[in-house]
Amino acid sequence: MYVMETNIKTASNIRNAGFEGEILTDEKSLVPYENDTSLFELRPALAVKPKSAEDVKKLVAFISEKKDANPNLSLTARAAGTGMAGGALNDSIIVDVANLNHIRSVSAERAVVEPGVFYRDMDTETRKQGVIMPSFPASRNLCAVGGMVGTNASGEMTLTYGSTENWVKRLKVVLSDGNEYEFGALTADELEKKKKIKGFEGEIYRRMHELLEKDYDIIKRAKPKVTKNSTGYALWNIWDRKTFDLTKLFTGSEGTLGLFTEIEFALIKPKEHRKLIVIFLRDLKILSTLIGKVLSHKPETFETYDDRVIQFILRFFPDFVRVMKTGLIKLGLSFIPEVIMVLKGGFPKLVLLAEFTGSTEEEASQKAQAAFEDLKQFNLQVEIMQTPKEAERFWTMRHESFNILRKHSGKNKTSPFIDDIIVNPAKLPEFMPRLDKVMAEYKLTYTIQGHIGDGNFHIFPLMNLHNARDRDIVMELSQKVFDLVFEFGGSMSAEHNDGLVRTAYLRQMYGEKIYHLFEETKNIFDPKNIFNPGKKVYGHDLAYIKEHIDKVY
Ligand SMILES: Cc1cc2nc3c(=O)[nH]c(=O)nc-3n(C[C@H](O)[C@H](O)[C@H](O)COP(=O)(O)OP(=O)(O)OC[C@H]3O[C@@H](n4cnc5c(N)ncnc54)[C@H](O)[C@@H]3O)c2cc1C
């Protein structure tokens, strides 16, 4: 009762501070904010839905002022709430940016949007100009751009075009002093001018520049040796002694340094024609040579899923038919080649999808054919899909298996906790059997899929989280898999970020010195720790993490 009264009082004080948007305090309205797509459940005290950037500024100024008297107050941004790490969950105030959903402008080069805009809506507008923002995740129809920037999301086109950090060109951010600032790439001269500004903005540039200069080489060396990374703060990407760009720091910062109010994305014209090669692999020993060979032909995307995904799809075939919108018989017939293959030699361990693109049909076909010819030396089953329709069933298996798995998990939950590991693809033949061995200790049902061209795998075990033993396994297996990933010089998360699920392991991944620089960075931007506490630095211990695993789904 006391807590409820305090929350209502806080809500009324926020209103009195001039906040115009909705403020949600009742139990029922807060339920949707307890979960995202992660393992966790956390009840917030309040949720607020700012109407405008002005509202965000008032809110931050209010919390900043009250924080000393009430240390529990904090602000955690939430866009579409599809994150897999629990980044948008917290126990204080959730800032739902759903109403900051205006598309400000779209040209053939740039889109300027508010953080609550769904990627799918921005995509509809950019496609009218013949362009796209290419770092979209598989959840492109579900997620919003604020969350994509918050997590540094990426997806199948990232192999060619890089993660979201490559596409954010300018950000408006409300910082902990309650003011909105604009960030983008600066020359060394522009940086010096910024450093001379009096007040918080100048202080940010002065202190960040000093931090990055002081340990310049150590910071550059700390960058994980993988093609994409969403863990920690990307200090190594900000300053190369020519350009100083704080958008690189904000992207992937999970709302721990400030709240984004406007994002400018760069856009590209996608290649229109595509040809898919499907490779069925039984022997993982040749994996790295095979990956190197395929990559030498420069596919636009290079994805994979394992034998468990195929078995799963076959088990829930009617669902797959529904997603494909093709008749049962027609779709069933299209699988005859795979059925014959299985009868002859069992399921392939991995199915690899390499897609080649071009501005003309001929260009895409030539690239695919050249790769196809080159792959003959491996004596594998390799097929070129002649039409987009033929390619579609493989893409649907890759894209939809997580959702189908989720729907059929019954009392089990598709549990993302080792969901996003990445190691250099050259190390996979040694890494994969070691990973298999660790996984085999627990006899779990799980699928593996992912972005093989980057060495990035999504492992989704089905866990009965009502059961204490399964919750123990989550904790034990996380540690074992992360130990292995670190031994191979990889990263715990290529795209899903740290959130609740991985923050506790950041110190181990980066070591004491870099972790301390992360803490200093947080202190520069958010000295009172008002933004998304418990994420990235000053995280919760493992007991807290385990305690907040959702047991009542
Ligand atoms: C079926 C499925 C498939 C998925 N596939 C992929 C994939 O291929 N690749 C991938 O990267 N992810 C994937 N995800 C995870 C998720 O969709 C992405 O991480 C997505 O970018 C999150 O967007 P969101 O709008 O839901 O963000 P949320 O979950 O709402 O927030 C994510 C983070 O961003 C922060 N944030 C949000 N808005 C702001 C703001 N205005 N200012 C500051 N910080 C902010 C939040 O605090 C939080 O830390 C998948 C999820 C599902 C359910």
Image (cartoon, rainbow, N blue to C red):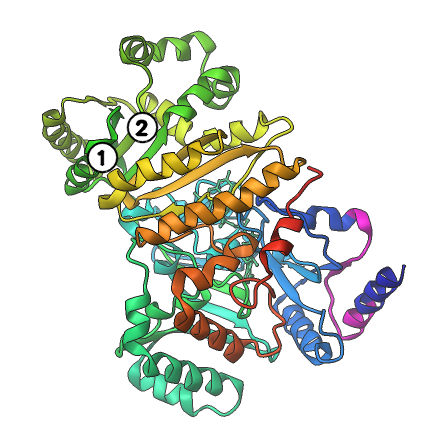
**Frontmost residue, 133 versus 419:** 419
- Image side of residue 44 versus residue 489, left or right: right
| Mark number, residue 210 | none
Cα separation, mark 2 vs mark 1, equals: 10 Å
Task: Give the residue type at disc 1.
Answer: Leu
The one nearer the camera, 441 or 550, is 441
Task: Tell me: residue 294, above or below residue 410.
Answer: below
Quadrant occupied by the C terminus: top right
Q: Secondary structure at mark 1?
A: helix
Q: Residue furthest front?
A: 441
Pointer 1 residue:
287
Q: Mark 2: which secondary structure? A: strand
User: Residue 199: x, y in percent?
Assistant: 53, 89
Residue 27 is at least partly visible in this image: yes
Residue type beneath disc 2: Leu
Q: Give the x, y percent position of residue 548.
A: 66, 50
Which residue bears the numbered disc 2?
Answer: 350
Marks 2 and 1: CB-CB under 8 Å?
A: yes
Q: Is residue 163 above or below residue 436?
A: below
* Residue lying farthest to the right in this orientation: 1
At horizontal 46% and vertical 12% (from top left) the residue drawn is: 327
Does the magenta portion include 372?
no
Q: Which residues are magenta?
A: 12-28
Who is closer to the viewer here, 256 or 387? Answer: 256
Quarter in which the N terminus is drawn: bottom right
Q: Is residue 417 visible?
A: no
- Say whether mark 2 is within 8 Å of ligand 1: no
**Which residue shows up at 63% across the image and 54% down it?**
543
